[in-house]
Image: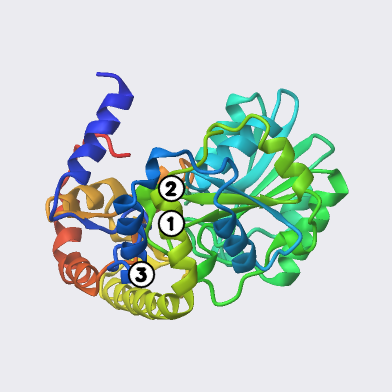
């Protein structure tokens, strides 16, 4: 069977399991705010989906995203999830002979997009406790050259959960400017951070900010996000985008409603997911050799190191799968460091995290006995 078929069946089985506890994809499974549900049902009732939405997004949504980011001079292109914006930018701005610079670990898909357009991929290792699992300006400086076309930074980082300070972001943006590179600032998880600084503040000319509704608002399956940059750059990216017919209108109505209730929704979501982080840290402390790499995580997940506990991430994932719990093997993020850890998501009902924690000792024991794990994705 082709790999894509195997992969699809893998996710189809997970998706169609109504008992599944989703602790593997950083999605948000807290119950939806009633105003968001109402906006979607209202849109369906009015059957407004017969029409295409405006190509760059419903104006109200574009304005709300701009306000949420606090970038009044930037232009918003609403996309089918942040990933469509990443695809657009990485494919269109890359070409043979240029470098795409990013961190390892990070999110792998933009690398694949840039590579498909011929860019050389330069990965900077940041899985280093001695650096606090962070990219340093010196590392970035050493990795860039006149050939650097794109610097891609996931901030807060997926999977590590580190978030960069204003000083660090300013330094990174300065390095990008010094070589004339675009700076793609993937802020998919910024709503979970205590503090977050946009690179666009320091380098508005060539920063592309990636925005998502999948994680903070819990709309992953609705596919809605945006890229935000200066109007000239958006003009360039809007010329031949992957989807020129406007994004899903129901999703856009949900996103508009979500941004309007964000002030009452987000604090509680963050309180609950930080509670979940604390519970996982407690459970992990009870297992000799296991450790959480970065705590508190500035995103909605934790990296749990299992290498010194004598279990492979794959075996642990397989063990939890027998309990209808999905967690993610590190190899999804990084071939280099992936054998060290699993990732556990925290924007989920407390009962799911409690189930993960209660079963951890038994799952570690079970994983030690698992030898052959079928392919995981
Ligand atoms: C760093 C990063 N960027 C983008 C995305 C995709 O976001 P969206 O669901 O908005 O396409 C993800 C999803 O996991 C991600 O981790």
Using the image, determine if residue 375 lies above or below residue 346: above
Q: Position of residue 186 (x, y in %)?
A: 59, 53
> Which one is earlier in the sequence, the residue at label 2 or at label 3?
3
Whether tag 2 and tag 1 are in contact, CB under 8 A, the answer is: yes
Q: Position of residue 230 (x, y in %)?
A: 76, 51
The mark found on residue 249 in the picture is: 2
SS at mark 2? helix
Residue sitting nearer the eye, 215 or 94: 215
User: Which residue is pictured at 87% across the width and 49% down the height?
Assistant: 178
SS at mark 1? helix
Q: Is residue 113 left or right of residue 326?
A: right
Residue 13: quadrant of the picture: top left
Please give the residue where the numbered disc 3 appears in the rendered image.
Answer: 35
Disc 2/disc 1 C-alpha distance (Å): 6 Å
Around disc 1, counting alpha carbons within 10 Å, would you say few (fewer than 14), some (14 to 19), or many (20 or more)? many
Q: Is residue 349 visible?
A: yes
């Amino acid at each position: 069977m082709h790999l894509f078929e195997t992969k699809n069946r893998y996710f189809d089985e997970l998706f169609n399991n109504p008992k599944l506890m989703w602790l593997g994809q950083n999605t948000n499974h807290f119950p939806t705010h009633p105003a968001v549900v109402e906006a979607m049902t209202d849109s369906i009732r009015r059957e407004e989906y017969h029409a295409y939405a405006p190509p760059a997004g419903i104006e109200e949504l574009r304005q709300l995203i701009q306000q949420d980011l606090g970038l009044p001079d930037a232009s918003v292109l609403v996309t089918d999830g942040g990933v469509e914006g990443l695809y657009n930018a990485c494919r269109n701005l890359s070409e043979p002979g240029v470098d795409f610079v990013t961190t390892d670990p990070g999110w792998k898909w933009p690398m694949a997009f840039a590579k498909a357009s011929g860019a050389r991929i330069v990965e900077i290792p940041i899985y280093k406790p001695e650096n606090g699992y962070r990219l340093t300006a010196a590392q970035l400086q050493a990795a860039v050259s006149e050939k650097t076309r794109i610097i891609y930074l996931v901030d807060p980082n997926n999977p590590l959960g580190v978030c960069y300070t204003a000083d660090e972001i300013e330094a990174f943006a300065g390095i990008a400017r010094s070589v004339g590179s675009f700076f793609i600032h993937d802020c998919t998880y910024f709503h979970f951070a205590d503090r977050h600084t946009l690179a666009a503040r320091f380098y508005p000319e060539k920063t592309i900010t990636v925005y998502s509704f999948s994680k903070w608002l819990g709309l992953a399956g609705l596919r809605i996000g945006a890229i935000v940059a200066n109007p000239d750059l958006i003009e360039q990216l809007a010329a031949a985008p992957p989807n020129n017919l406007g994004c899903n209108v129901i999703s856009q109505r949900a996103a508009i409603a979500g941004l309007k209730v964000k002030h009452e929704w987000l604090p509680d979501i963050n309180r609950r997911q930080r509670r979940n982080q604390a519970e996982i840290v407690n459970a992990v402390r009870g297992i000799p050799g296991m450790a959480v790499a970065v705590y508190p995580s500035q995103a909605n997940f934790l990296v749990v190191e299992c290498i010194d506990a004598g279990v492979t991430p794959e075996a642990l994932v397989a063990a939890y799968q027998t309990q209808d719990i999905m967690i993610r093997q590190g190899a999804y993020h990084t071939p280099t460091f992936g054998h060290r850890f699993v990732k556990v998501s925290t924007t989920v009902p407390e009962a799911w995290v409690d189930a993960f924690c209660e079963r951890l000792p038994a799952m570690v024991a079970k994983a030690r006995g698992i030898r052959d794990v079928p392919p995981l994705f």
